[in-house]
Image (cartoon, helix red, strand yellow):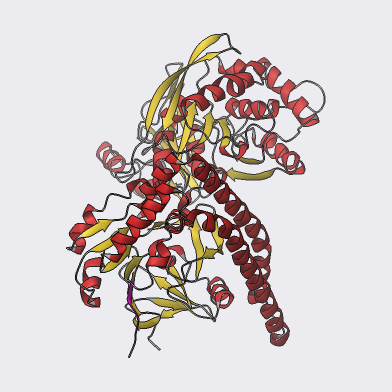
């Protein structure tokens, strides 16, 4: 018997949506839902379509706009917040510099031909180097976040503290929390600013795309079809760890080049033991706590470079 | 002979009705792999294909097709090529330069229009067409008092959709900016690339010189206008990111020279350059052969080649391989790379024209100003 609050994860809700059916199928508890759409940035409040789709009361947490209000009222806090962002971006840039070379080397060893034993040893070592770099980057981003996070969340800013309280009260009064897709950096940072992650553990969560990514332990950015071509997947930072052991890859059917098996293989092996799970349009993935209940059309990346249907263990 | 024409002449010279039907049912010019056949119909003493492509004869003669009023000329055009052309028709001793009457595809520029031949494999990029989904930005006019030119000048400013004063924006200065709007669909391209998250929302200043051959030819006044008049004026009016990496200059042909010159005159100010088919004429020894209008360009380029410095951290360059300027552009690449500049150079099967420059915008802009696509998971 599985235990823990439900988590319903979906793929992109455009061009078609499966939110309404998925909520019914999952037996979402009745009642109001709090909505977090900070990833939509200035379009945060445009949730009328969601109200219509969901067919139940939605309470917009408005954390993107709340953050703007806080920044306008406290220039020092805004400056520190921006400074933290600049440092995190710089950290990401430095990580990317190192990642590029290691990823090229790892892919070349995966494609190498010759003595299998020699190649396998070099592959393992090349991937281990990548994993070490990912770990280091994760540690660095957390180190850069922590002092700011502590400062922001002490409640010594009256307005910030009021928003913390209000958000807490709203979430406590709702049966579920819905987190939309959008800009992952904006979503993650604004949720952290108001300490929202601490309020989610006991709640039923419905999330899609970026909203699902923030629930994992690690957030991995990926896109093989940018105007400049393929990019190596990057660890962006720690998520909220509410669904351990998974890395979520929204819209993978579009963003990943499925036929390029060496890239898929590298991604799978690099992030192992976490499972790289695709969340494509139409997917509905259900968890009870951290136990997987239903997989819908979700797929997973394999260590031999394929993308196969995800099955419940 | 082109297979369609061969079929038309299979049983001897076709009659008027057969020619009418052939013209009605064919797309011109006739593209058969790399063989492209241009067709003209009408009375003439001679007909020439004029396409001003470096590497081809400037006038390619048409051949009359037996016992008809049809003329044809075939050239070899490699896959993915795009060229602009006109027909030179000689009738009654008079030379007439005309658009291809059988081809509706035109490219416009400040001097008029040319017919366009899209070779086998060329396809106009989808992002150059207006899209119903993309929100459109606005273009507004700003008047700037210029100390450099001792006069007030109007500049068109592209403001992205969803512009908000409490955000900060990158800025790009575009030489011949109004021409870019009119002939290279720049506004549509910006709207589409911003909508697709491939570039960030940004402010784009569209300058249009009243005397471009002089002011864009390595003129210090123009560099000062950009750096000391226009940039401060825009920084006061719009929330711009105060960082070289968020500032860039762009231009084509002489506009490419002006962009490079401005960045060179004010090193460290502009982090990005987008240079298209720059007219980087220089002379290693003796006098250059390009005419007096290039004199100041050559003076600047010779000095630049001697003391290049680091005009920008990142430079995107493109040039058509059917341009005579391909030599000068290729020559510049290793020199910029030797300075440690991050440089991307793209050669394409196209010539010195606005549609070539339009088709390169996505690669250049999205490389210099990567958008939030990487961060957005809808």
Q: Nearer the viewer, residue A129 or B284?
A: A129
Classify the position of the C terminus of chain B by image quarter: bottom left
Q: Is residue A5 magenta?
A: yes
Residue B249 location in percent, x, y?
58, 32
Across and down, in percent, residue A100 comes to: 65, 61
Pick the residue in front: B135 or B187.
Answer: B135
Q: How many marks?
A: 0
> What's the residue at 63%, 21% (across, down)?
B223
Name the residue at 54% across, 60% down.
Answer: A230
Answer with left or right where residue B265 lies relative to residue B198.
right
Residue at the spot x=38%, y=63% of the render? A211
Q: Residue furthest top?
A: B150
Residue B62 visible in the snapshot: no
Name the residue: 38% across, 56% down.
Answer: A164
Left or right: B361 as drawn, with respect to A159: right
Which residue is the extreme one toward the right? Answer: B285
First to last magenta residue range: A3-8
Residue B328 vs residue A274, the one in the foreground: A274
**Position of B352 compared to A123: left or right?**
left
Q: Is residue A4 above or below residue A68?
A: below
- Residue that protrudes farthest toward the bottom in the picture: A1
Q: Is residue A135 left or right of residue B177?
A: right
Q: Position of residue B196 (x, y in %)?
A: 41, 49
Whether B278 is drawn above or below A136: the answer is above
- B203 to B89, vertically: above or below: below
Q: Is residue A238 magenta?
A: no
The part of the image, by quadrant, that contains residue A94 is bottom right
* Residue B119 spot, x, y in % from top left: 47, 45
Q: Nearer the viewer, residue B303 or A313?
A: A313
Residue B308 visible in this rendered orientation of the protein: yes
């Amino acid at each position: 018997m599985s235990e823990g609050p439900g988590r319903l994860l979906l793929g992109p809700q455009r061009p078609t949506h499966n939110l309404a059916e998925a909520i019914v199928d999952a037996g979402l508890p009745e009642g109001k839902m709090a909505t977090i759409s900070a990833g939509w940035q200035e379009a945060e409040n445009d949730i009328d379509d969601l109200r219509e789709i969901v067919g139940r009361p939605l309470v917009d947490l408005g954390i993107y706009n709340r953050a703007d209000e806080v920044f306008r009222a406290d220039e020092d806090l805004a400056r520190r917040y921006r400074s933290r962002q600049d440092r995190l971006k710089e950290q990401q840039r430095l990580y990317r510099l190192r990642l590029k070379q290691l990823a090229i080397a790892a892919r070349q060893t995966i494609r190498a031909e010759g003595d299998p034993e020699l190649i396998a040893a070099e592959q393992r070592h090349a991937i281990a180097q990548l994993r070490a770099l990912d770990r280091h980057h994760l540690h660095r981003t957390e180190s850069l976040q922590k002092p700011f996070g502590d400062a922001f969340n002490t409640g010594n800013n009256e307005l910030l503290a009021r928003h913390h309280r209000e958000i807490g009260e709203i979430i406590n009064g709702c049966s579920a929390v819905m987190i939309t897709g959008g800009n992952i950096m904006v979503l993650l940072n604004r949720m952290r600013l108001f300490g929202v992650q601490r309020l989610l553990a006991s709640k039923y969560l419905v999330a899609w795309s970026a909203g699902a990514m923030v629930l994992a332990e690690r957030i991995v950015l990926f896109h093989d079809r940018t105007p400049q071509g393929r990019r190596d997947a990057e660890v962006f930072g720690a998520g909220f760890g509410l669904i351990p052991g998974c890395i979520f890859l929204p819209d993978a059917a579009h963003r990943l080049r499925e036929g390029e098996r060496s890239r898929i293989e590298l991604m799978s092996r690099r992030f192992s033991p976490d499972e790289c799970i695709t969340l494509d349009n139409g997917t509905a993935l259900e968890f009870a706590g951290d136990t997987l209940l239903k997989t819908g059309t979700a797929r997973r990346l394999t260590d031999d470079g394929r993308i196969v249907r995800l099955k419940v263990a | 002979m082109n297979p369609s024409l061969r079929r038309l002449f299979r049983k001897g010279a076709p009659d008027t009705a057969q020619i009418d039907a052939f013209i009605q049912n064919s797309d011109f010019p006739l593209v058969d792999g790399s063989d492209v056949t241009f067709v003209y119909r009408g009375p003439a003493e001679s007909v020439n294909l004029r396409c001003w492509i470096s590497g081809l004869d400037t006038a390619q003669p048409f051949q009359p097709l037996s016992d008809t009023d049809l003329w044809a000329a075939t050239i070899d055009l490699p896959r993915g090529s795009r060229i602009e052309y006109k027909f030179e028709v000689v009738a009654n001793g008079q030379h007439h330069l005309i658009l291809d009457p059988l081809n509706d595809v035109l490219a416009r520029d400040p001097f008029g229009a040319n017919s366009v031949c899209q070779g086998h494999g060329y396809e106009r990029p989808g992002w150059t067409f207006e899209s119903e989904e993309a929100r459109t930005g606005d273009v507004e006019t700003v008047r700037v008092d210029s100390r450099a030119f001792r006069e007030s000048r109007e500049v068109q400013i592209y403001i992205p959709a969803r512009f908000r004063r409490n955000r900060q924006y990158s800025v790009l200065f575009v030489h011949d900016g109004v021409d870019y709007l009119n002939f290279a669909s720049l506004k549509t391209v910006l709207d589409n690339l911003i909508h697709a998250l491939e570039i960030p929302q940004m402010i784009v200043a569209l300058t249009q010189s009243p005397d471009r051959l002089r002011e864009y030819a390595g003129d210090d006044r123009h560099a000062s206008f950009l750096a000391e008049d226009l940039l401060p004026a825009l920084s006061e009016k719009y929330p711009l990111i105060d960082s070289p990496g968020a500032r860039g200059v762009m231009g084509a042909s002489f506009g490419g020279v002006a962009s490079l010159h401005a960045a060179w005159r004010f090193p460290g100010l502009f982090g990005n350059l987008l240079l298209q088919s720059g007219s980087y004429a220089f002379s290693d020894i003796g006098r250059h052969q390009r005419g007096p209008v290039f004199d100041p360009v050559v003076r600047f380029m010779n000095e630049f080649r001697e003391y290049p410095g680091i005009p920008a951290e990142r430079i995107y360059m493109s040039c058509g391989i059917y341009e005579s300027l391909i030599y000068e552009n290729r020559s510049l690449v290793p020199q910029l790379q030797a300075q440690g500049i991050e440089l991307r150079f793209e050669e394409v099967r196209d010539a010195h024209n606005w549609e070539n420059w339009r088709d390169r915008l996505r690669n250049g802009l999205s490389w210099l100003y990567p958008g939030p696509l990487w961060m957005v998971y809808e």
